[in-house]
């Protein structure tokens, strides 16, 4: 996907303005060192997006893409755990209770 035809959400930076921001390119929480988004970051994002769960899911798919790119660049010899990464970044964004961090 080229920059010209990317959806605008891809140009939005990952959330950084909350108390549990990611450390890039490691994608660990700067505050609690858990894999990002940590439980506190998930709660903050859910609170921020409120009933716009679809918007949060779309944002987190874009963030997942960025995280996969960063983590692959750091360690290209390791195959990514795609189901695990999807669950970590996107799987919790739907309605229902928050699941524990992976
Ligand atoms: Zn945290």
Image: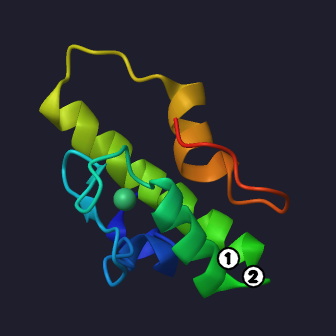
Disc 2 and disc 1 in contact, CB within 8 angstroms: yes
Viewer-side residue, 21 vs 90: 21
Residue 1 rendering spot, x and y as whole percentages: 42, 56
Q: Where does residue 32 sit, x and y in percent of width and height?
A: 30, 55
Q: Residue at x 71, y 54 (%)?
A: 98
The residue that label 2 is drawn on is 52
Q: Nearer the viewer, residue 69 or 14?
A: 14
Give the CA distance from mark 2 to mark 1: 5 Å
Q: Which residue is mark 1?
A: 55
Q: Please tell me whether mark 1 sits on a helix, a strand or a loop.
A: helix
- Residue drawn at x 52%, y 56% as measured from the top left: 39
Against 17, is 54 above or below? above
Q: Is residue 1 above or below residue 74?
A: below
Q: Residues within 10 Å of mark 2 (few under 14, many from 20)?
A: few
Determine whether, in the image, residue 39 is placed left or right of residue 36: right
Category of crowding for the residue at label 1, using alpha-carbon neighbours closer than 10 angstroms: few (below 14), some (14–19), many (at least 20): some
Residue 66 coordinates in the image, percent (x, y): 35, 54
- Single out the residue that lies furthest toward the left: 74
């Amino acid at each position: 996907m080229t920059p010209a035809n990317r959806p605008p959400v891809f140009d939005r930076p990952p959330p950084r303005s909350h108390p549990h921001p990611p450390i890039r390119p490691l994608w660990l929480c700067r505050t609690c060192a858990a894999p990002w988004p940590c439980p506190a970051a998930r709660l903050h994002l859910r609170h921020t997006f409120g009933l716009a769960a679809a918007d949060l899911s779309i944002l987190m798919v874009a963030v997942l893409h960025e995280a996969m790119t960063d983590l692959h660049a750091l360690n290209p010899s390791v195959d990514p755990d795609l189901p695990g990464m999807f669950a970590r970044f996107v799987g919790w964004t739907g309605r229902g209770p928050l699941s524990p961090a992976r």
